[in-house]
Image (spheres, coloured by chain):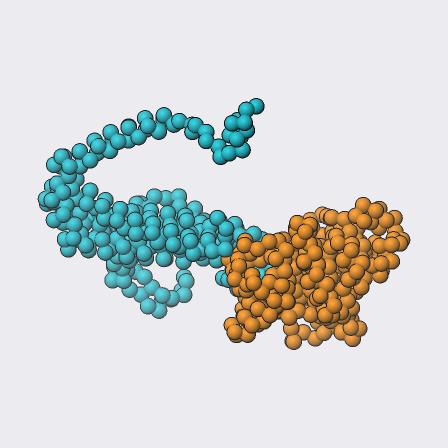
């Protein structure tokens, strides 16, 4: 063994790295495709960017955006609240509550949202009058459903009732993911079940609940476009109304997509911070 | 629990825990087959035995984490989990059970700290939530308790940032924050790396010295010999032998005790 070799053995390792020829091939393919896309975006006049810019902040589009936002917020808030109730019912020791929640979830998850929204839009045919009274007995107050009911309410309720079924399963999964030792430790300290749920179980379940809830919220943003079945004006409906008389179909739909992308990007930022908040105390 | 009339059996005799023919079944498996045990005020009772002997189950019956199927169990003169009127037993409501548990601290094998709270918050939580203590008072006592278990410099850490021994010491402080009159330890050092066992036993030793009534399910025979006032050997759901730790360990009377001790000592 020569002296030089010994020195090499004790020194820093300078090895020839493994080559990755596949990366170069992939990079070339992606670059070509990207160039084609950019070229298309710039040269294809069917995009009509000028038309898009003209309507981007126009009053009907902004109204659609506003309605899309509030529907998303209302549907998620209501869906989460009702979903927590349903999840607790499914985890309850009371078989009646368990069964009722199961049937609810079965119905609302097992039928298309679009069909449900169509039904909400025609709910007046199902319940012509709404009243308050004793079941199967006398009614104290009663009113025409159409008087109490707006398209906005139908749209929001349709989304909430559907979302609650999905949120219920997400919340139930989150609660069940919390180690049973947590419940025992809280019980041993003298916490009641409600206190344990609120302070110990739910905050930990949130770590598991938050990521899929973020996905649900982003889905919801896009699913609000289905409320045109009610019908209720939101972003996609608004641009449809525009291209119905301008015939600029693709530019308006692309513009709507840009709005959706912008809004969902904002939500992804929010999701990141939410997940970080509920990940407190967990080493990563 | 002020509305419950204390039963005659437990009150005057200075007993902290009194078990009479306690039985517990899981399905068809009889885990406890008639346990008779008494723990005096200030006594440290160590319970040993092979796994599956029912010792942990018995401990969990004491604070009603498990419901007993037969017999009677009193803590500080109060029937655990039930209210007796005449010859009839009434199940306690959830709030009443919670109220009974306030005075009984428990330390678990796997610590069961609340992972989303810092060490300090873990200790403050129950006094604030259950006793409605003011935040400042709860914090002051939590700081003092964490200091007592040697963790003054770790109060802001989350459980995941603490070693097993440190976590278990936080768990002891958390139980002490409720100012219990009885402490239950369910194999508190069994999940720890060997070099961390000592720091937890030291804290328990100090606690015993200060006069805390303790029931300790453990495999630490050295601790039982040195700190325990009494030693109970359980096997297959019965108390096989009990007595002064030094004597039981040095001179076990029963064949089953001898067989068990020959394996662990």
Relative vertical location of residue A35 with respect to residue A192 in this rendering, above or below: above
Q: What chain is colored cyan?
A: A
Residue B200 visible at all: yes
Identify the image quadrant of residue A71. Answer: bottom left
Residue A192 visible at all: no
Q: Is residue A48 left or right of residue B60?
A: left
Kindly identify the residue that appears in the image at 76 percent across and 74 percent down. B11
Q: Is residue A238 left or right of residue A212?
A: left
Rendering colour (chain B): orange
Relative vertical location of residue B202 with respect to residue B31 in this rendering, above or below: below
Kindly identify the residue that appears in the image at 14 percent across and 42 percent down. A49
Kindly identify the residue that appears in the image at 58 percent across and 61 percent down. A186
- Residue with the most extreme front position: A3
Residue A240 screen position, x and y as percent: 17, 45
Residue A227 screen position, x and y as percent: 26, 49
Front one among B207 and A190: B207
Kindly identify the residue that appears in the image at 67 percent across and 58 percent down. B199
Front one among A171 and A129: A171
Identify the image quadrant of residue A20. Answer: top left
Relative vertical location of residue A173 with respect to residue B132 in this rendering, above or below: above
């Amino acid at each position: 063994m020569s002296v030089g070799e010994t020195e090499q053995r004790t020194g820093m390792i300078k090895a020839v790295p493994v080559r990755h020829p596949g990366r170069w091939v992939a990079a070339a393919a992606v670059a070509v495709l990207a160039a084609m896309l950019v070229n298309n975006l710039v040269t294809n006049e069917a995009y009509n960017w000028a038309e898009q810019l003209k309507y981007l902040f126009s009053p009907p589009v902004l109204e659609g955006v506003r309605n899309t936002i509030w529907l998303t917020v209302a549907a998620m808030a209501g869906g989460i609240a009702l979903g927590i109730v349903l999840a607790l019912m499914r985890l309850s020791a009371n078989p009646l509550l368990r069964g009722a929640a199961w049937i609810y979830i079965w119905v609302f998850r097992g039928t298309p949202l679009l069909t449900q929204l169509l039904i909400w839009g025609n709910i007046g045919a199902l319940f012509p009058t709404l009243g308050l009274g004793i079941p199967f007995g006398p009614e104290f107050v009663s009113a025409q459903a159409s008087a109490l009911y707006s398209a906005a309410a139908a749209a929001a309720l349709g989304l909430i009732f559907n979302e609650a079924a999905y949120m219920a399963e997400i919340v139930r999964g989150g609660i069940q993911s919390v180690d049973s030792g947590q419940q025992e430790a809280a019980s041993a300290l003298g916490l009641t079940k409600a206190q344990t749920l609120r302070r110990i179980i739910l905050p930990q379940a949130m770590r598991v609940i938050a990521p899929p809830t973020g996905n649900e919220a982003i889905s919801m943003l896009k699913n609000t476009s289905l409320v045109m079945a009610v019908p209720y004006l939101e972003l996609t409906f608004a641009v449809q109304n525009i291209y119905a008389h301008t015939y600029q179909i693709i530019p308006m739909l692309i513009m709507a997509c840009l709005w959706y992308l912008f809004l969902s990007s904002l939500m992804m930022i929010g999701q990141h911070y939410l997940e970080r908040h509920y990940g407190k105390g967990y080493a990563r | 629990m002020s509305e419950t009339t204390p039963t005659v059996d437990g009150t005057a005799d200075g007993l902290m825990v009194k078990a009479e023919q306690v039985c517990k079944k899981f399905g068809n498996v009889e885990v406890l087959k008639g346990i008779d045990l008494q723990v005096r005020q200030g006594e440290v009772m160590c319970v040993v035995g092979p796994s599956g002997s029912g010792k942990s189950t018995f401990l969990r019956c004491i604070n009603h984490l498990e419901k007993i199927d037969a017999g009677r169990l009193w803590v500080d003169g109060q029937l655990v989990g039930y209210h007796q009127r005449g010859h009839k037993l009434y199940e306690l409501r959830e709030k009443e059970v919670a109220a009974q548990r306030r005075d009984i601290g428990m330390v678990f094998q796997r610590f069961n700290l609340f992972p989303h709270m810092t060490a300090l918050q873990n200790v403050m939580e129950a006094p604030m939530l259950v006793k409605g203590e003011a935040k400042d008072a709860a914090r002051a006592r939590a700081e003092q308790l964490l200091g007592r278990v040697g963790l003054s410099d770790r109060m802001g850490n989350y459980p995941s940032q603490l070693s097993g021994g440190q976590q278990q010491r936080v768990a002891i402080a958390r139980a002490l924050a409720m100012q219990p009159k009885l402490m239950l330890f369910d194999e508190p050092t069994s999940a720890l790396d060997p070099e961390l066992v000592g720091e937890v036993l030291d804290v328990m030793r100090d606690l015993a010295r200060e006069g805390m009534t303790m029931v300790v399910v453990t495999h630490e025979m050295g601790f039982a010999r040195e700190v325990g006032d009494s030693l109970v050997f359980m096997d297959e759901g019965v108390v096989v032998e009990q007595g002064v730790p030094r004597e039981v360990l040095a001179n076990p009377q029963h064949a089953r005790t001898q067989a068990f001790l020959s394996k662990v000592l």
